[in-house]
Amino acid sequence: MPKTEPIKAVRGVRDILPEERGLWRVAEQAAARVAHRFGYREIETPIIERRELIERGVGEDSDAATKELYRFEDRGGRQLALRPEATASVVRAYFEGGLNQGPQPARLYLMGPMFRYDRPQKGRYRQFFQFDIEAIGGSSPALDAEVIEVARAWLFEVGLKELTLELNTIGDSICRPAYLDLLRAYYRPFKSRLHSECQHRVEVNPLRLLDCKVPQCQPFKADAPRITDHLCEPCALAWKTVRQLLDAAGIEYHLNPYLVRGLDYYTRTVFEFYPAGSTGSQDALASGGRYDGLAAALSWESTPGVGFAGGLDRVTELMATEGEQVITEPAAEVIVLPDGDLVAEAAEVARLIRTVRSAAVDYEPRSLRAKMRAADKQQAKWAVLFSAENAKQHKVQLRDMRTGEQVEVSWPELPERLLPD
Ligand code: AMP
């Protein structure tokens, strides 16, 4: 038989090994704790959705839909996609699950994997994980401030306190069209000096000209009209209220007129959290905003909503570099080491120990010495050794791996001897 290559993981995705998983759990538990503290309840939605939902949710013309979407046809010929973000799914579930009939707004959170067929690089994966918060069915600007506070509280809780909050508004369907005309008119004379994608954006999606990172497009931004000078009255009031509420909460922010979203259903508040001192090229830790047009874009009843998505991959990477203690998954505290073929007896001894502590059995056919070495490597606190002779008398040798002290103990005594202090 020809030797074939061992099968490896798919490009752009990765394993989170037990050594790292503990840190992830800290981030996830903090997310759940903070979400609950603000009255948000957990929801799970499927990883697969109808392609239409996702394409309308991320915008059919956007990069995320055209290039980055994992799409496929199932065996029944259904057009499906792996979710690239959670908001469209959560909004769908809000209606399908009748949450729109309950108290409003519905405060929901979700944690799970998202999929984007992006070019993999450090910090950017094709499967990555988000903590997602959505407040659906409320239009109060206080909710915008609230979700910002939730995001910040989560990042604080995992020890990331040196943050920059970038904030902007992008108006709504009342005031934005006129502003976009102004922006187009401003950019048209410079069109030939913009990079090719931006040339296209002038007519199609002028708001995205503002967050372009390509050097040749930068000089035109400073004099571009700003939407904050062209808001309708309700948007201007909401914008003022959000800032006042953030001020009252002691949350510092940086007004960034170039922070935008390219899709029509996004309205008013947009925000992003970055590690303090990061350059603009770095990716955000969390980003969010209001999407009052999304429900209608999905053909549900028009319903306002606001939320954010935080990236668990980035957050845990930063936690690790900020010196957050490495928290590995604990291995068994007690290792049961039968000397010889004493499988049933070893299993029984382990079962007794598990009433008080975690225990695993070394079933490998190797010498007791080799088993001891393995137990040591696993940093077990105790080893429980026994021979066939011991087993007959229902006895074991209980060894404290730290001190090397060893005492003979009867099986029924074991749980008591191993009681956690
Ligand atoms: P977005 O849904 O694009 O606004 O992203 C929200 C957050 O998810 C970002 O701030 C990142 O932390 C994280 N994120 C987005 N895309 C990726 C990716 N490809 N790999 C890892 N994290 C990501």
Image (cartoon, rainbow, N blue to C red):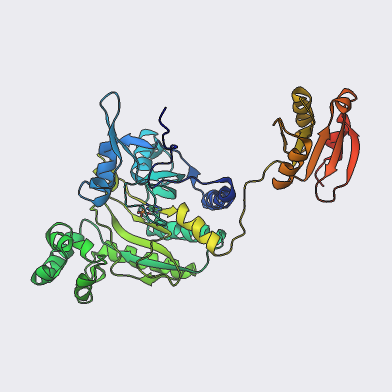
> In this rendering, is residue 176 above or below 162?
above
Q: Tell me residue 407's x, y (percent).
A: 90, 40
Based on the displayed image, in which of its 4 quarters is residue 343 positioned? top right
Based on the displayed image, in which of its 4 quarters is residue 212 positioned? bottom left
* Left or right of residue 406: residue 187: left
Residue occupying image coordinates x 55% and y 59%: 320
Count the labels in the image. 0
Residue occupying image coordinates x 88% and y 43%: 406
* Left or right of residue 109: residue 72: left
Q: Residue furthest front?
A: 1
Q: Quadrant of the N terminus?
A: top left
Q: Tell me residue 326's x, y (percent).
A: 61, 56
Quarter of the rendered structure image containing ligand 1: bottom left
* Left or right of residue 347: residue 99: left
> In this rendering, is residue 264 above or below 333?
below
Q: Nearer the viewer, residue 161 or 145?
A: 161
Residue occupying image coordinates x 33% and y 47%: 116
> In this rendering, is residue 218 above or below 398?
below
Based on the displayed image, in which of its 4 quarters is residue 193 positioned? bottom left
Q: Tell me residue 323's x, y (percent).
A: 58, 64
Q: Nearer the viewer, residue 341 or 255?
A: 341
> In this rendering, is residue 9 above or below 366?
below
Tell me, yes or no, if residue 175 can be seen here.
no
Q: Tell me residue 298's x, y (percent).
A: 26, 41
Q: Nearer the viewer, residue 103 or 390?
A: 390
Tell me, yes or no, if residue 344 can be seen here.
yes
